[in-house]
Image (cartoon, grey):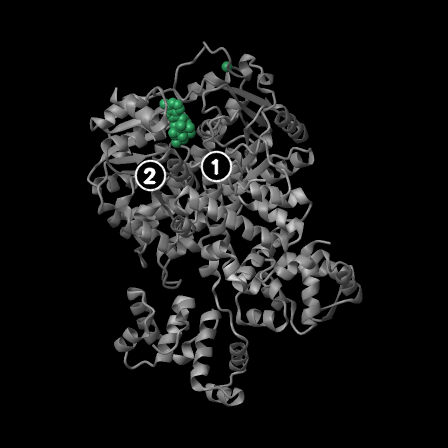
Amino acid sequence: MDISRAIIMDVLQKVDGSRKCSGIYYILTGKKTAQSLSDSQWFKIEPYYASLKGLTVEDFNSILDELCTKEFINLKEDQVFLISEKGSNFLEKNKSYYFFMEKLNGLKYASIEHKCWQVLSLFVQSLSNALYHFLNFSPVIRDRDAAEKVKILFPRTDEQRKQVASQLYIELKIILKKCDSKSAEIFVNKLSGYNRVGHTFDQSAREWGLSRVEAVLRFRSVLHMIFYSIKEKPESYTVLYTLLGELIDIPALTKSALQTYHLLKQEKDLKEIMKIRNLKLSTMEDHLVEIAREIPDFSIQPYIRDEDKDRVSHFYNKTKKFKLRPIKEAFPHLTYLQIRLVLAKEGGKHAVGSGT
Amino acid sequence: MQLEAALKQYYGFDEFRPGQKEILEDILSGHDVLGMLPTGTGKTLIYQLAAVLLKGRALIVSPLVSLMQDQVDQFKQTGFKKTVALNSFLDQSDKRSILKHLKDYQFVFVSPEIMQNNYIRSTLLSVEWSLFVVDEAHCISQWGHEFRPHYLDLVYVKKELGDPVCLALTATATVKVQEDIQKYLGIEKAKVHIHSVNRPNISLFVESFSDLEHKQDRAIDLISELKGPGIVYTNTRRSAEQLVNLLHEKGMHNVSYYHGGMEQDERLLVQKQFLNSQLKLIVCTNAFGMGINKPDIRYVLHYHAPSNMEGYVQEIGRAGRDLHPSAAILLYHPSDLEIPFHFIENELPDHNQIDFILSDYDVLSEQTVAERLHLAGISETGQRFMEYHLNSAGVLNEKGISEDKRESLKKTLKLKIEARKKEKLRSLRMIENWIMTNGCKRNMLLNYFGEEEKNDMEYCCSGCQDDLERFYGKEEPKLLIDHEWEDELKRLFRQEV
Ligand SMILES: Nc1ncnc2c1ncn2[C@@H]1O[C@H](COP(=O)(O)OP(=O)(O)OP(=O)(O)O)[C@@H](O)[C@H]1O
Ligand SMILES: [Mg+2]
Ligand SMILES: [Zn+2]
């Protein structure tokens, strides 16, 4: 059975009838709505968030139809499906095959994995060629940011290159050893280096007799494993950390902020929420900023007039400084919270700091 | 001798190819030049060296965005690192950062459309230019096969930039098109260097089929027999993929497709694999073959007929750039022409769409002509065409245009479109004719470009009994390290075993 079917079945199992299939579709394709973000955590299906990026609704529906016909799932009510006993037996029996997906964390990494891969892949290609003293290679990555980053971090002398290579080799080897050999193979084959250009997903899939989706997922599972390892133990992965540390440092919505968010969505006002959750005002405000930053669909309109918002973003974009004080001085009639909300929407991760 | 020394220094080549030196000399002494040199003979080298010797900066207009990016890669690989491309694919921040550092670049590629943007144009004005290069200059002519209306504005841009020396280059221009290039670029006094389109090292083969399956079998046979590397052109993405799947089924593994529907990362991998000889063959659509500059391509096989002679010449021009014998093979079935025919019919807006774009404003809401243009559902080429003409008529960003003006505009546009369609259909008939007519394919091709026949070729074409089997053979298989990931990782990082 193709992996996308197994994923859909597993998600149906975990959601257990409490979401319509459209909601599930959004999670699987990684649509950034508040609902799919929080559902992914709620139902503990973070690995699957954005696991089927690019799947069309038509294909999704025809998979559901097919699974129904084969009685792996049943229709509970309009648009709601449940896994059947046959379905869950199937998953149980093939558990070990799908085990590699435990390493996925689409919710955390879907938004940054591509950038990270571009940096890593270009760095490895450049380093490998340099180690063989072949300087005139043609890069497989054109992204300007990645090129800039690699240029800055690239070791200058032969000696340094050798050192970095040995270290990076060890780091990758340790992580790849934690993965199954098929996924490791696919990952290494995607790397480019001296005298070899990496595989495309189609090529890897063909070589291993897998579907393209599975080849992509196996590759991503290794990539996510790398991110996870760096985060856990940056001191053991010094080269990888230098390359990717900054990129993977994205705080996702915390549990506490998530609860606040659920209450907000039930149209409770701030005072009520503070009472229910027994929160200090400053914590409440931190949550709001966090939510504004992490959840694109969360509108800050109730907290600040559009006109003020536009003026603050204009001011910020002109100076590009995340200092609150100068902005506060320029707009004395606004509160710090209002300014932080605008910045959260503008600049994402930098807007975490509270106060000054 | 100074020129030869530079050639040696920058490329390691010993001598110029015909035309290169003469054009360089003219440019260096300050003349505008129109150069027509056959495909793959090194037009790029001319403006690279010219800019270097002038110690100046070159602006290069190039029509295809995908091609442009490939060119930038090639420039960097040749050692011209200060090269950049400005096109609509860049995001805002990249564009800004390039423009901010414009003066640090020596070669700047631009699409003709992007110079419509006032901000970009004024930034371009802020640095000095020694050379204004118009690559694929045939795009300026209505009679060229790839007419790009925005090329007509280049003459103004050039003036604004202070009229730097202008070099217009093409491989495929009939006499009429050559005249248009000079006229519309305002370089009537240019030195003209016209060389034959003929590529003597490429043998031409045409085979006709009345049965699609036979054609497919023949293609597969040829692909397994011919010595690679090779390129196969198909006229749709789908047929490119289908053919590749078929070849995989037959056990040919080092074959991939390459087209605009692929993710950019993946496309780049396939292209670089091919350049690195990891692939023996790529199957592509015509829009994506153009950027491939691999010297040792031994054959180009057309799985479908292209839609005009010029396009055909450009496409087979990917072969034999190292000047070694190579083959161009066209496998023809009458249904090949259906897709280009359909395309010609639908590319430009029809009467209804024109009427919609320029309809009565009292009835409909407050929209500018440009907004309507985007709602009309026309192809990219069609949009470009309309945008250009509506802009020239000064109505693109207007609302509430007088009835008289609208009516007269509708009429002129419809006439222009009809004329363009007719021209394209004529070109389609020409290539059909070329395929169907028995005789020397090379001479017929030369005739089309208004050149004299060549009758002294040792090897020529299927009409002159050249033998396709000459091109059979096996290439040295590239040693592809096919071992466990641990060994490959070791190799990549050069760790001792
Ligand atoms: N004088 C020379 N000696 C040897 N090789 C040359 C010389 N000049 C150019 N070349 C090589 O010829 C190849 C083709 O050059 P280039 O891409 O500039 O062709 P072109 O004329 O622009 O063709 P097209 O019309 O297909 O774009 C390049 O690989 C280049 O290195
Ligand atoms: Mg060229
Ligand atoms: Zn002949």
Q: Are marks 1 and 2 in contact (CB under 8 Å)?
A: no
Q: Is residue A328 left or right of residue A57?
A: left
Residue A122 visible in the current orientation: no
Q: As shown in the figure, which amino acid type bears the numbered disc 1?
A: Tyr
Query: How many numbered circles are shown?
Result: 2
Q: Chain of mark 1?
A: A
* Image vertical order of residue A246 relative to residue B106, above or below: below
Q: Secondary structure at mark 2?
A: strand
Residue B349, image x, y percentages: 44, 46
Quarter of the figure that contains the C terminus of chain A: bottom left
Crowdedness near tag 2: few (<14), some (14–19) or many (≥20) residues, C-alpha within 10 Å = many
Ligand 2 falls in which quarter?
Answer: top left
Q: Nearer the viewer, residue A176 or B367?
A: A176
Q: Is residue A34 left or right of residue A147?
A: right
Crowdedness near tag 1: few (<14), some (14–19) or many (≥20) residues, C-alpha within 10 Å = some
Q: Is residue B466 left or right of residue A163?
A: right
Q: Quadrant for residue B359, please give it.
A: bottom left
Q: Is residue B187 left or right of residue A298?
A: left
Residue A60, image x, y percentages: 65, 59
Residue at screen point 54% across, 36% down? B284
Residue B445, image x, y percentages: 45, 21
Q: As shown in the figure, which amino acid type bears the numbered disc 2?
A: Val
* Image vertical order of residue B158 relative to residue A252, above or below: above
Q: Chain of mark 2?
A: B
Q: Nearer the viewer, residue B295 or A119?
A: A119
* Image vertical order of residue A297 relative to residue B339, above or below: below
Q: Is mark 2 within 8 Å of ligand 2?
A: no
Q: Quadrant for residue B251, please give it.
A: top right
Residue B187, image x, y percentages: 24, 31
Residue matched to label 1: A132
Quarter of the figure that contains the N terminus of chain A: bottom right
Residue matched to label 2: B61
